[in-house]
Amino acid sequence: MQPAAEGMAMESYDEDWTDSQRALYDECYRAGGEWAADPDTPSDDVQHVINLAEADDDAFDDAEIDYPPLVDAVTQASGVNVTSVPARHDDPGFRGFTDGVRDATADDVFGL
């Protein structure tokens, strides 16, 4: 299972991302998958993140998201204490976490 997840993650890189942005994506992807797979994570919270993943960037209007699991993942992955994350799919932290959640969630659970 792990090699397939890593393969999916690498396909989601932006071409112009630096190595550090790719590493941030990978760490946030892993954190998102672990968070979604945790039995203590409420299904409504998982659905919320999936909705964020599916939304168009235009819907966010350059918003910053302070959703705790996402902020915690980016803080841990980057080593920098952040209080919010840009709600954009070209942001490696945001996209890594939401891709990880989406890929860790069974299609039949949320109708993806």
Image (cartoon, rainbow, N blue to C red):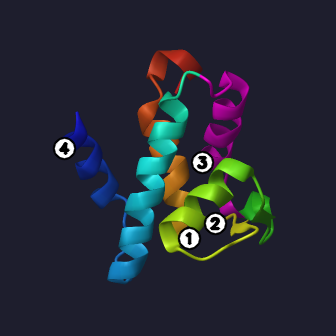
Question: Residue 106 at what x, y percent from top left?
Answer: 44, 22
Residue picked out by circle 3: 53
Main secondary-structure element of the magenta-colored stretch: helix
Which tag, 4 or 1, sits closer to the chain's start? 4
Residue type pointed to by label 3: Ala
Residue type pointed to by label 4: Pro
Residue lying farthest top?
108
- Evaluate whether residue 89 shows in this view: no
Residue picked out by circle 4: 3
Residue 80 vs residue 36, the one in the foreground: 80
The residue shown at (69%, 63%) is 87
The residue shown at (48%, 57%) is 28
**Alpha-carbon span between mark 3 and mark 1:** 12 Å
Left or right position of 9 against 103: left
Which element is circle 2 on? loop
**Alpha-carbon span between mark 2 and mark 3:** 9 Å
Q: Give the range drawn in magenta.
A: 40-57
Which element is circle 1 on? loop
Which element is circle 4 on? helix
Left or right position of 33 against 54: left
Residue picked out by circle 2: 88
Residue picked out by circle 1: 91
Residue 78 vs residue 43, the one in the foreground: 78
Occupied quadrant, residue 62: bottom right
Q: Residues within 10 Å of mark 1 (few under 14, many from 20)?
A: some
Residue type pointed to by label 2: Arg
